[in-house]
Image (spheres, helix red, strand yellow):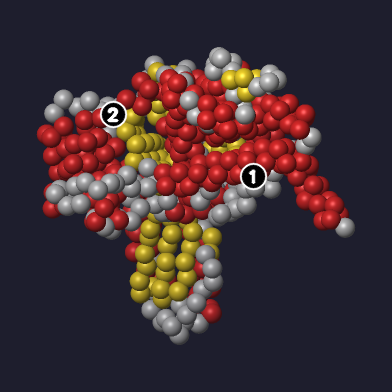
Amino acid sequence: MESRISFRGAVPLWHHLPIVGIRNLTLRKVATGRLCNLSRSPSVSTALMTQVVVLTRNSFLLLMYFTGIMNMQSNLPAHEVDNAIRIFNFTFNLISPVGNLVRALIISMNMFSSLCRGSPPVMASYPGEITLYGGPILYLIGQSLVLFLVLMTVDHKWTAGWGHKTKLSPDAEVRLAREPEVSEEIQRVEHATDGLRAQHLERTFKHRNGGIMTAVDDLTFGIKRGEVFAVVGPNGAGKSTTIDMIRGEIQPSQKGSSLHLESIDMMKDRRTARAQMGVCPQFDAVDQMTCVEHLEFYAGIRGVSDPKRNAQQIVRAVGLERFAESMASKLSGGNKRKLSLGIALIGNPQLVLLDEPSSGMDPLAKRTMWKTLAEFVPGRSVLLTTHSMEEADCLADRVGVLAQRLLDVGTTDHLRHKHGYGFHIQLICKSAPHTTTDEMNMVKEWIEEQIPGAKEEGYAYHGQVRYNIPAHDPNADAMTVQTEEQGLSVGRLFVLLEENKEKLGLEFYSVSPSTFDEVFLRVMEKHHVEEEMAPVVKKDWKYWVKTIGKGLLPFLFI
């Protein structure tokens, strides 16, 4: 009897071939969905690693499935085996597509008398019943739909409204800590028609300790058409996170955040916004193609009518004529940055996002890039992040200083006037390095008498002394606005020192205005921001549960 059943059990594998085909098709959809989801996971960096993760997971689930089946066949009483296996299949296979595959193969080969019904046993007449092929096929279809939904959610950044916290209005202490220019920028953007308008952006991440780390906190700014807006800040200030939110790679964490490109709502109509956007990320988007082929490829993607002509124009603009036919992967770091800049400028975008585009470039290449950008700026909004204060001073119409939140904003001249020292003068006596203390004291007294607010920088040494000079008289009435004629200038300081050079016994002197590096450092100092400062972690209930759990874990094994 047993041999007859085993022989007949092989028939359904071919007799029910369409059902087996449906099962294989649904399993393939499930596997494809899982591969696509994993490929977008930040913990999986390559396609090969994705395949390894999926293979490892499926192997583990397959082992667990066979272990469960064999244990029940070996250890349970005979009259309980069928019911236990049925329950196991309907529960374990909810999370195991490979378990459904194995279940279908067991049925097709009639292993463990899966097709037998009744006593004496007879072959099941309908293969589509829920306990035969119907269950695995139904489960695989459901898993395909769930994984497809997850794939669409990840790919299109769909998020549930209840998953975002409502942004609370800042309290009085936070508003008072803001610079007046930041408050004015927030009010201006609310009613502006700028090319790019970013309002109340906030982004948090889960910290490895279990708390919540704030990367960007209530950031608001606008970029007018034909304007370069530079964002400067220390490492970890949130510059790249801000660009990622504008690109649509990540979503703001709070309700109330908004992003607009002209009249396009970038958070709702991301596809249209991306068609008007050019991006130069920190990494170099190069492949196994030549420079011209890269540009033609991206021009074709953006729908440029004449990709070849556009690519040749970009090659000349960014200074890659010598390397036009060279493999992009073999270029130097600076030339790769030039190519990335060219890719960002393909297709005449309305908004250009440049995330540290000059990193790795020599001084000559930097100035070539600056000249290229200056030619492309008219009619576009350009957002530039950089660590080079010289680059921000040269290119930017306005500069925002960022350290999680916007610390200050304005033109470089305004920020230099507000936060800079004004001028630096360095004096060297004729008798140096044998200058006496009396001679140095005479020079110091004259400087402090003639130039109010002059502050000695460091200490006088061997006949040399350096002073910080404010641009305006610090003793003037705060309500009185000093004009350019009333304030100091490089020319006036030169005249003053030249007229008294012999009287003071000076051999050399120099006058220089404050650099933008000094302005940046003073803003950081004013707001108590440190380089690579530790992230502020909000210790919510999850943090405390994880911390207490780690503390109690050793006691569980005592």
Q: Nearer the viewer, residue 133 or 431?
A: 133
Q: Position of residue 223 (x, y in %)?
A: 40, 29
Residue extending furthest toward the front: 1
The image shows residue 456, relative to residue 489, as above or below, that is below
Could you classify mark 2 by the number of other residues whose Cα lies within 10 Å: few (under 14), some (14-19), or many (20 or more)? Answer: many
What residue sits right under mark 1 in the picture? 207
- Which mark is nearer the camera, 1 or 2? 1
Secondary structure state at the residue bearing disc 1: loop
Q: Position of residue 210 (x, y in %)?
A: 69, 44
Q: Which image quadrant for residue 508?
A: bottom left
Q: Residue at x 50, y 77 (%)?
A: 461
Q: Nearer the viewer, residue 207 or 450?
A: 207
Are the residues flagged by discs 1 and 2 in contact, CB closer than 8 Å? no
The image shows residue 528, relative to residue 255, as above or below, that is below
Of the two numbered discs 1 and 2 on the same chain, state the one appearing first in sequence: 1
Q: Position of residue 226 (x, y in %)?
A: 30, 29
* Quadrant in the picture for the N terminus: top right
Secondary structure state at the residue bearing disc 2: loop
Residue extending furthest toward the bottom: 434
* Quadrant in the picture for the C terminus: bottom right
Q: CA distance from mark 1 to mark 2?
A: 36 Å
Q: Residue at x 51, y 73 (%)?
A: 460
Q: Position of residue 337 (x, y in %)?
A: 29, 49
Q: Which image quadrant for residue 121?
A: top right
Which amino acid type is marked by label 1? His
What residue sits right under mark 2 in the picture? 349
Which amino acid type is marked by label 2? Pro
